[in-house]
Image (cartoon, rainbow, N blue to C red):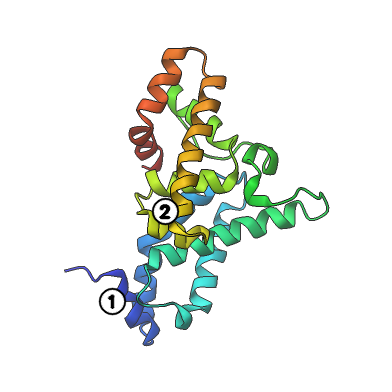
């Protein structure tokens, strides 16, 4: 029977490096995907930085807290630091409030094969980064609101309002970008299915 994240974390904190390696293996593809949809390059570097930061702080990880929440919280911080370095002298303002269309002008490596998926990716890139992250954690990772709150460091009630705002902004951007009202409708109607397809 596979060990839980908490069991692996406890063993890792107790000095079992194999348990740490298993945690990394369990989450590497998901963390890599988190960055792949948001940066044009340095995906491997950012994923490695995330796991290195986690390794360095392993003794401080609260075993009562979801390891996934902790790890995605580090990934978000690494992403914001990446854009802080990229826009150091630009005076761009609060990074989480900027869209990827502003932060990352080169297209990401994320490939969308169907028209609906291409439209969804374009629309996601045009909403504020922290709202994009909330949408992705909710649909891609199927995180409960409490875990999302831990990742983006806001109260759970604020996550609810941000998720609502994110979906409304996403709907407006899809309506603006879609070649037809029918395509816009099917893209939003199938958001959960398309997000799982993109995650896969």
Q: Tell me if 75 is positioned left or right of 91 in this view.
A: left
- Residue at left 41%, top 77%? 62
Q: Is residue 21 above or below residue 190?
A: below
- How far across and how far down the image is residue 98, in percent? 66, 44
From this viewpoint, which residue is outermost toward the right? 89
Q: Secondary structure at mark 2?
A: helix
Q: Tell me if 178 is positioned left or right of 4 in this view.
A: right
From this viewpoint, which residue is outermost toward the left? 1
Report the residue marked by disc 1. 7
| Quadrant including the C terminus | top left
- Residue at left 65%, top 36%? 101
Q: Can you see residue 114?
A: no
Q: Can you see residue 108?
A: yes
Circle 1 packing at 10 Å, graded few (<14), some (14-19), many (20+), is few
Disc assigned to residue 30: 2
Q: Secondary structure at mark 1?
A: helix
- How far across and how far down the image is residue 169, in percent? 53, 33
- How far across and how far down the image is residue 36, in percent? 52, 46
Q: Is residue 113 above or below residue 90?
A: above
- How far across and how far down the image is residue 83, in percent? 68, 53
- Residue at left 47%, top 81%? 60
The CA distance from mark 2 to mark 1 is: 20 Å
Disc assigned to residue 26: none
- Residue at left 36%, top 87%? 14
Counting residues from the N terminus, which is met first, the one under dot 2 or under dot 1?
1
Quadrant housing residue 139: top left
Count of residue discs = 2
């Amino acid at each position: 029977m596979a060990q839980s994240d908490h069991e692996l974390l406890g063993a890792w904190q107790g000095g079992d490096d194999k348990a740490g390696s298993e945690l990394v293996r369990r989450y590497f593809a998901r963390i890599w995907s988190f960055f792949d949809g948001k940066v044009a390059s340095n995906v491997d570097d950012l994923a490695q930085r995330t796991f290195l930061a986690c390794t360095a702080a392993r003794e401080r990880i609260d075993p009562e807290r979801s390891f996934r929440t902790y790890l995605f919280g580090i990934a978000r911080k690494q992403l914001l630091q990446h854009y802080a370095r990229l826009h150091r002298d630009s005076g761009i303002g609060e990074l989480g409030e900027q869209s990827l269309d502003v932060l990352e002008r080169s297209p990401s490596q994320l490939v969308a094969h169907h028209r609906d998926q291409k439209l969804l990716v374009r629309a996601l890139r045009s909403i504020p980064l922290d709202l994009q992250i909330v949408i992705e954690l909710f649909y891609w990772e199927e995180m409960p609101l409490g875990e999302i709150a831990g990742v983006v460091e806001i109260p759970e009630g604020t996550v609810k309002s941000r998720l609502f705002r994110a979906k409304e902004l996403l709907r407006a951007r899809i309506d603006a970008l879609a070649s037809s009202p029918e395509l816009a409708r099917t893209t939003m109607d199938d958001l959960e299915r398309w997000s799982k397809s993109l995650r896969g």
